Protein backbone atom coordinates (compact mmCIF):
# COMPACT_ATOMS: atom_id res chain seq x y z
CA UNK A 1 0.00 0.00 0.00
CA UNK A 2 1.09 3.53 -0.73
CA UNK A 3 -0.24 6.51 1.22
CA UNK A 4 -0.58 9.66 -0.84
CA UNK A 5 -1.03 12.88 1.08
CA UNK A 6 -2.64 15.64 -0.94
CA UNK A 7 -5.45 15.30 -3.46
CA UNK A 8 -4.47 18.18 -5.70
CA UNK A 9 -3.69 17.64 -9.36
CA UNK A 10 -0.51 15.58 -8.86
CA UNK A 11 -1.96 13.63 -5.93
CA UNK A 12 -5.00 12.63 -8.01
CA UNK A 13 -2.83 11.73 -11.01
CA UNK A 14 -0.49 9.50 -9.00
CA UNK A 15 -3.27 7.98 -6.87
CA UNK A 16 -5.47 7.28 -9.90
CA UNK A 17 -2.76 5.66 -11.99
CA UNK A 18 -1.30 3.67 -9.10
CA UNK A 19 -4.67 2.34 -7.95
CA UNK A 20 -5.73 1.52 -11.52
CA UNK A 21 -2.57 -0.55 -11.98
CA UNK A 22 -3.22 -2.64 -8.90
CA UNK A 23 -1.47 -0.80 -6.07
CA UNK A 24 -3.53 -0.24 -2.96
CA UNK A 25 -3.67 3.50 -2.35
CA UNK A 26 -4.86 5.50 0.62
CA UNK A 27 -5.40 9.09 -0.47
CA UNK A 28 -5.40 11.72 2.27
CA UNK A 29 -7.39 14.85 1.61
CA UNK A 30 -7.75 18.20 3.29
CA UNK A 31 -11.48 17.92 3.92
CA UNK A 32 -13.95 15.16 4.77
CA UNK A 33 -16.08 16.21 1.83
CA UNK A 34 -13.21 15.71 -0.62
CA UNK A 35 -12.59 12.25 0.83
CA UNK A 36 -16.27 11.35 0.55
CA UNK A 37 -16.49 12.45 -3.08
CA UNK A 38 -13.35 10.52 -4.04
CA UNK A 39 -14.49 7.41 -2.15
CA UNK A 40 -17.84 7.60 -3.91
CA UNK A 41 -16.84 8.68 -7.44
CA UNK A 42 -13.35 7.18 -7.59
CA UNK A 43 -10.69 9.00 -9.61
CA UNK A 44 -10.81 9.74 -13.32
CA UNK A 45 -7.60 10.56 -15.17
CA UNK A 46 -8.24 12.17 -18.54
CA UNK A 47 -5.86 12.53 -21.44
CA UNK A 48 -5.13 15.97 -22.85
CA UNK A 49 -7.70 15.40 -25.60
CA UNK A 50 -10.39 14.63 -23.02
CA UNK A 51 -10.52 10.81 -23.38
CA UNK A 52 -10.64 8.86 -20.16
CA UNK A 53 -7.20 7.33 -19.66
CA UNK A 54 -7.96 5.67 -16.36
CA UNK A 55 -10.91 5.38 -14.05
CA UNK A 56 -10.64 3.72 -10.70
CA UNK A 57 -13.55 3.27 -8.35
CA UNK A 58 -13.30 3.88 -4.64
CA UNK A 59 -13.03 0.61 -2.73
CA UNK A 60 -10.33 -1.82 -1.85
CA UNK A 61 -7.68 -0.42 -4.22
CA UNK A 62 -8.50 3.21 -3.52
CA UNK A 63 -9.45 4.55 -0.14
CA UNK A 64 -9.77 8.21 0.73
CA UNK A 65 -9.78 9.87 4.13
CA UNK A 66 -9.27 13.34 5.54
CA UNK A 67 -5.79 13.97 6.94
CA UNK A 68 -7.35 14.78 10.30
CA UNK A 69 -8.17 11.04 10.59
CA UNK A 70 -4.54 9.99 10.10
CA UNK A 71 -3.87 9.05 13.71
CA UNK A 72 -6.98 6.91 14.07
CA UNK A 73 -6.69 5.11 10.72
CA UNK A 74 -2.95 4.76 10.89
CA UNK A 75 -3.24 2.91 14.20
CA UNK A 76 -5.34 0.29 12.37
CA UNK A 77 -3.19 0.05 9.22
CA UNK A 78 0.17 1.79 9.66
CA UNK A 79 1.58 3.67 6.71
CA UNK A 80 4.86 2.37 5.36
CA UNK A 81 5.42 4.36 2.18
CA UNK A 82 4.18 7.91 2.03
CA UNK A 83 4.16 10.20 -0.97
CA UNK A 84 3.68 13.80 0.15
CA UNK A 85 2.09 15.62 -2.76
CA UNK A 86 0.74 18.72 -1.08
CA UNK A 87 2.14 22.14 -1.74
CA UNK A 88 4.96 23.58 0.36
CA UNK A 89 2.49 25.68 2.37
CA UNK A 90 0.75 22.59 3.75
CA UNK A 91 3.89 20.80 4.97
CA UNK A 92 3.54 22.03 8.57
CA UNK A 93 0.00 20.68 8.84
CA UNK A 94 1.00 17.36 7.24
CA UNK A 95 3.89 16.91 9.65
CA UNK A 96 1.68 17.67 12.66
CA UNK A 97 -0.73 14.95 11.61
CA UNK A 98 1.70 12.21 10.64
CA UNK A 99 3.95 12.84 13.62
CA UNK A 100 0.98 12.51 15.95
CA UNK A 101 0.86 8.85 14.95
CA UNK A 102 4.54 8.06 14.44
CA UNK A 103 4.95 4.38 13.68
CA UNK A 104 6.89 2.60 16.36
CA UNK A 105 7.14 -0.82 14.77
CA UNK A 106 8.45 -0.02 11.35
CA UNK A 107 10.47 2.58 9.55
CA UNK A 108 8.70 4.87 7.19
CA UNK A 109 9.85 6.06 3.78
CA UNK A 110 8.57 9.49 2.77
CA UNK A 111 8.85 10.68 -0.82
CA UNK A 112 8.50 14.46 -1.13
CA UNK A 113 7.34 15.96 -4.40
CA UNK A 114 7.05 19.65 -3.59
CA UNK A 115 8.15 22.45 -5.86
CA UNK A 116 10.84 24.74 -4.47
CA UNK A 117 13.38 24.11 -1.73
CA UNK A 118 13.53 24.25 2.05
CA UNK A 119 10.97 21.55 2.89
CA UNK A 120 13.27 18.51 2.92
CA UNK A 121 15.33 19.76 5.88
CA UNK A 122 12.11 20.62 7.67
CA UNK A 123 10.68 17.14 7.20
CA UNK A 124 13.95 15.45 8.18
CA UNK A 125 14.18 17.52 11.35
CA UNK A 126 10.58 16.94 12.31
CA UNK A 127 10.65 13.25 11.55
CA UNK A 128 14.19 11.89 12.11
CA UNK A 129 13.03 8.27 12.28
CA UNK A 130 11.78 8.40 8.68
CA UNK A 131 13.87 8.02 5.55
CA UNK A 132 13.11 11.05 3.44
CA UNK A 133 13.42 10.86 -0.34
CA UNK A 134 13.49 14.22 -2.11
CA UNK A 135 11.90 13.92 -5.53
CA UNK A 136 11.15 16.08 -8.52
CA UNK A 137 8.64 15.65 -11.27
CA UNK A 138 7.86 17.41 -14.51
CA UNK A 139 4.51 15.64 -14.92
CA UNK A 140 1.87 18.18 -15.84
CA UNK A 141 -1.57 17.73 -14.33
CA UNK A 142 -4.67 19.86 -14.14
CA UNK A 143 -7.45 19.15 -11.69
CA UNK A 144 -10.91 19.27 -13.23
CA UNK A 145 -12.98 18.79 -10.11
CA UNK A 146 -12.63 17.05 -6.79
CA UNK A 147 -12.05 13.63 -8.34
CA UNK A 148 -10.82 14.12 -11.88
CA UNK A 149 -7.58 15.31 -13.36
CA UNK A 150 -6.19 15.87 -16.83
CA UNK A 151 -2.74 14.41 -17.48
CA UNK A 152 -1.74 17.60 -19.25
CA UNK A 153 1.90 16.90 -19.98
CA UNK A 154 3.96 13.74 -19.86
CA UNK A 155 7.00 14.31 -17.70
CA UNK A 156 9.59 12.39 -15.74
CA UNK A 157 10.04 11.81 -12.03
CA UNK A 158 13.38 11.46 -10.23
CA UNK A 159 13.56 10.16 -6.70
CA UNK A 160 16.72 10.74 -4.69
CA UNK A 161 18.40 7.88 -2.86
CA UNK A 162 19.28 9.15 0.60
CA UNK A 163 22.81 8.32 1.83
CA UNK A 164 21.28 6.79 4.93
CA UNK A 165 19.38 4.19 2.94
CA UNK A 166 21.59 1.20 3.73
CA UNK A 167 22.26 2.33 7.27
CA UNK A 168 18.56 2.51 8.09
CA UNK A 169 17.65 -0.73 6.34
CA UNK A 170 14.50 0.86 5.12
CA UNK A 171 13.67 -2.04 2.86
CA UNK A 172 13.65 -2.46 -0.82
CA UNK A 173 12.55 0.84 -2.17
CA UNK A 174 13.42 -0.19 -5.72
CA UNK A 175 11.35 -3.31 -5.48
CA UNK A 176 8.29 -1.59 -4.15
CA UNK A 177 7.61 2.12 -4.72
CA UNK A 178 9.73 2.37 -7.83
CA UNK A 179 8.21 -0.73 -9.41
CA UNK A 180 4.72 0.33 -8.49
CA UNK A 181 5.24 3.71 -10.16
CA UNK A 182 6.75 2.08 -13.25
CA UNK A 183 3.85 -0.35 -13.44
CA UNK A 184 1.48 2.60 -13.24
CA UNK A 185 3.14 3.98 -16.37
CA UNK A 186 5.25 6.75 -14.86
CA UNK A 187 8.66 7.56 -16.28
CA UNK A 188 10.52 7.33 -12.97
CA UNK A 189 14.07 6.64 -11.86
CA UNK A 190 16.17 6.71 -8.74
CA UNK A 191 18.85 9.36 -8.74
CA UNK A 192 22.08 9.70 -6.80
CA UNK A 193 22.21 13.32 -7.96
CA UNK A 194 18.83 14.52 -6.84
CA UNK A 195 20.26 17.83 -5.62
CA UNK A 196 21.06 18.64 -9.20
CA UNK A 197 17.52 17.67 -10.19
CA UNK A 198 16.07 19.82 -7.42
CA UNK A 199 18.01 22.91 -8.50
CA UNK A 200 17.09 22.27 -12.14
CA UNK A 201 13.42 22.02 -11.21
CA UNK A 202 13.70 25.10 -8.98
CA UNK A 203 14.95 27.09 -11.96
CA UNK A 204 12.22 25.70 -14.24
CA UNK A 205 9.58 26.75 -11.72
CA UNK A 206 11.26 30.09 -10.99
CA UNK A 207 11.09 30.99 -14.69
CA UNK A 208 7.72 29.55 -15.75
CA UNK A 209 5.51 29.91 -12.70
CA UNK A 210 5.65 33.61 -11.76
CA UNK A 211 5.42 34.83 -15.36
CA UNK A 212 2.42 32.64 -16.17
CA UNK A 213 0.82 33.76 -12.90
CA UNK A 214 1.35 37.47 -13.59
CA UNK A 215 0.33 37.29 -17.25
CA UNK A 216 -2.38 34.69 -16.59
CA UNK A 217 -1.40 32.56 -19.55
CA UNK A 218 -0.90 28.82 -20.03
CA UNK A 219 2.71 27.62 -20.08
CA UNK A 220 2.92 27.33 -23.88
CA UNK A 221 2.03 30.98 -24.41
CA UNK A 222 5.27 32.05 -22.79
CA UNK A 223 6.92 31.03 -26.06
CA UNK A 224 4.52 32.96 -28.28
CA UNK A 225 6.25 36.31 -28.03
CA UNK A 226 9.95 37.37 -28.08
CA UNK A 227 9.35 39.83 -25.22
CA UNK A 228 8.09 37.01 -23.00
CA UNK A 229 11.04 34.80 -23.93
CA UNK A 230 13.36 37.70 -23.11
CA UNK A 231 11.87 37.92 -19.58
CA UNK A 232 12.21 34.17 -19.17
CA UNK A 233 15.86 34.38 -20.17
CA UNK A 234 16.47 37.22 -17.73
CA UNK A 235 15.08 35.09 -14.90
CA UNK A 236 17.11 32.12 -16.10
CA UNK A 237 20.35 34.11 -16.18
CA UNK A 238 19.79 35.61 -12.75
CA UNK A 239 19.10 32.12 -11.43
CA UNK A 240 22.31 30.77 -12.98
CA UNK A 241 24.29 33.61 -11.38
CA UNK A 242 22.82 32.71 -8.01
CA UNK A 243 23.82 29.07 -8.53
CA UNK A 244 27.35 30.08 -9.59
CA UNK A 245 27.72 32.30 -6.53
CA UNK A 246 26.62 29.43 -4.30
CA UNK A 247 28.84 26.85 -5.98
CA UNK A 248 25.83 24.92 -7.29
CA UNK A 249 26.50 22.85 -10.38
CA UNK A 250 24.33 23.79 -13.36
CA UNK A 251 24.09 22.81 -16.96
CA UNK A 252 23.62 25.00 -20.04
CA UNK A 253 21.05 22.45 -21.26
CA UNK A 254 18.68 23.69 -18.53
CA UNK A 255 17.50 26.58 -20.70
CA UNK A 256 16.40 24.11 -23.39
CA UNK A 257 14.67 22.06 -20.72
CA UNK A 258 12.66 25.09 -19.63
CA UNK A 259 11.53 25.54 -23.23
CA UNK A 260 10.78 21.83 -23.46
CA UNK A 261 8.59 21.91 -20.33
CA UNK A 262 6.67 24.90 -21.77
CA UNK A 263 6.03 22.94 -24.96
CA UNK A 264 5.20 19.66 -23.19
CA UNK A 265 2.72 21.41 -20.89
CA UNK A 266 1.66 24.06 -23.41
CA UNK A 267 -2.02 24.10 -22.51
CA UNK A 268 -1.42 23.66 -18.82
CA UNK A 269 -1.83 26.31 -16.18
CA UNK A 270 1.25 26.39 -13.98
CA UNK A 271 0.54 25.56 -10.34
CA UNK A 272 1.20 29.22 -9.44
CA UNK A 273 -1.33 30.51 -11.96
CA UNK A 274 -3.85 27.95 -10.70
CA UNK A 275 -3.26 29.21 -7.14
CA UNK A 276 -3.62 32.84 -8.14
CA UNK A 277 -6.87 32.11 -9.99
CA UNK A 278 -8.15 30.20 -6.96
CA UNK A 279 -7.05 33.05 -4.64
CA UNK A 280 -4.86 30.57 -2.76
CA UNK A 281 -1.40 31.12 -1.31
CA UNK A 282 1.26 30.40 -3.92
CA UNK A 283 4.66 28.73 -3.58
CA UNK A 284 6.46 31.88 -4.74
CA UNK A 285 8.34 32.23 -1.43
CA UNK A 286 9.77 28.71 -1.73
CA UNK A 287 10.69 29.26 -5.37
CA UNK A 288 11.67 32.82 -6.33
CA UNK A 289 11.92 33.86 -2.68
CA UNK A 290 14.45 31.09 -2.01
CA UNK A 291 16.54 32.18 -5.00
CA UNK A 292 16.55 35.76 -3.70
CA UNK A 293 17.66 34.58 -0.27
CA UNK A 294 20.38 32.39 -1.78
CA UNK A 295 21.54 35.43 -3.76
CA UNK A 296 21.69 37.58 -0.62
CA UNK A 297 23.64 34.93 1.29
CA UNK A 298 26.20 34.76 -1.50
CA UNK A 299 26.46 38.56 -1.85
CA UNK A 300 24.83 38.83 -5.28
CA UNK A 301 21.38 40.01 -6.36
CA UNK A 302 18.43 38.53 -8.23
CA UNK A 303 16.35 41.67 -8.82
CA UNK A 304 13.80 40.27 -11.29
CA UNK A 305 13.06 37.31 -9.03
CA UNK A 306 12.74 39.73 -6.09
CA UNK A 307 10.21 41.92 -7.92
CA UNK A 308 8.11 38.96 -9.05
CA UNK A 309 8.21 37.52 -5.53
CA UNK A 310 6.87 40.77 -4.11
CA UNK A 311 4.27 41.24 -6.83
CA UNK A 312 2.84 37.79 -6.31
CA UNK A 313 3.01 37.93 -2.50
CA UNK A 314 1.27 41.31 -2.77
CA UNK A 315 -1.78 39.69 -4.31
CA UNK A 316 -2.81 38.89 -0.70
CA UNK A 317 -3.96 35.38 -1.34
CA UNK A 318 -5.53 33.35 1.41
CA UNK A 319 -3.71 30.48 3.06
CA UNK A 320 -4.33 26.89 2.04
O1 LIG B 1 4.46 24.03 -11.00
C1 LIG B 1 4.11 23.62 -12.11
O2 LIG B 1 3.11 24.00 -12.68
C2 LIG B 1 4.96 22.55 -12.77
O3 LIG B 1 6.00 22.23 -11.90
C3 LIG B 1 5.49 22.88 -14.16
C4 LIG B 1 6.58 21.88 -14.51
C5 LIG B 1 6.03 24.29 -14.25
C6 LIG B 1 4.44 22.66 -15.23
O4 LIG B 1 3.33 23.49 -15.14
Image (cartoon, rainbow, N blue to C red):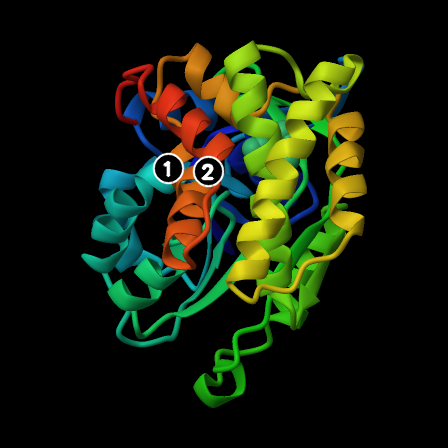
Locate residue 79 relative to residue 186 in the image: left or right. Answer: left
What is the C-alpha distance between the residues marked 1 and 2? 6 Å
Give 46 or 243, whichever is nearer the viewer: 243
Please tell me whether residue 232 is drawn above or below residue 23 in the rendered image: above
Residue drawn at x 33%, y 60% as measured from the top left: 123
- Ligand 1 is found in the corner quadrant, namely top right
Locate residue 300 relative to residue 21 in the image: left or right. Answer: left
Identify the mark at residue 288; answer none if there is no mark.
Answer: 2
- Whether pointer 1 and pointer 2 mark residues with C-beta atoms closer than 8 Å, the reply is yes
Residue that numbered label 1 is attached to = 285
**Mark 1 secondary-structure assignment:** helix
Q: Residue 314, image x and y in percent?
A: 31, 18
Locate residue 226 relative to residue 298 in the image: left or right. Answer: right
Give 299 or 40, whichever is nearer the viewer: 299
Q: Considering the image in quadrants, where does the C terminus appear?
A: top left
Residue drawn at x 74%, y 57% as measured from the top left: 251
**Mark 2 secondary-structure assignment:** helix
Residue drawn at x 37%, y 48% as measured from the top left: 293
Can residue 56 be seen at all in this image of the molecule? no
Q: Residue 142, image x and y in percent?
A: 60, 22
Locate residue 55 relative to residue 1 in the image: left or right. Answer: right
Residue drawn at x 64%, y 33% as measured from the top left: 234
Amino acid sequence: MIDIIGAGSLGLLFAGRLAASGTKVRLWTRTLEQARIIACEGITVLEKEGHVAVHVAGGDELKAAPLADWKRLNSQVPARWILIMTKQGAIGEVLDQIKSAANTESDIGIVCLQNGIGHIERIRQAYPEAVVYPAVTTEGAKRMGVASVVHAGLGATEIGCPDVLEEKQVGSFEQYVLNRLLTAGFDVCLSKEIENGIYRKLLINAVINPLTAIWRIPNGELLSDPGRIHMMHKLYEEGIQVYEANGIRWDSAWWDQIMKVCRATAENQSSMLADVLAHSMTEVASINGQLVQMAEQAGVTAPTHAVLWQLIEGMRLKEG
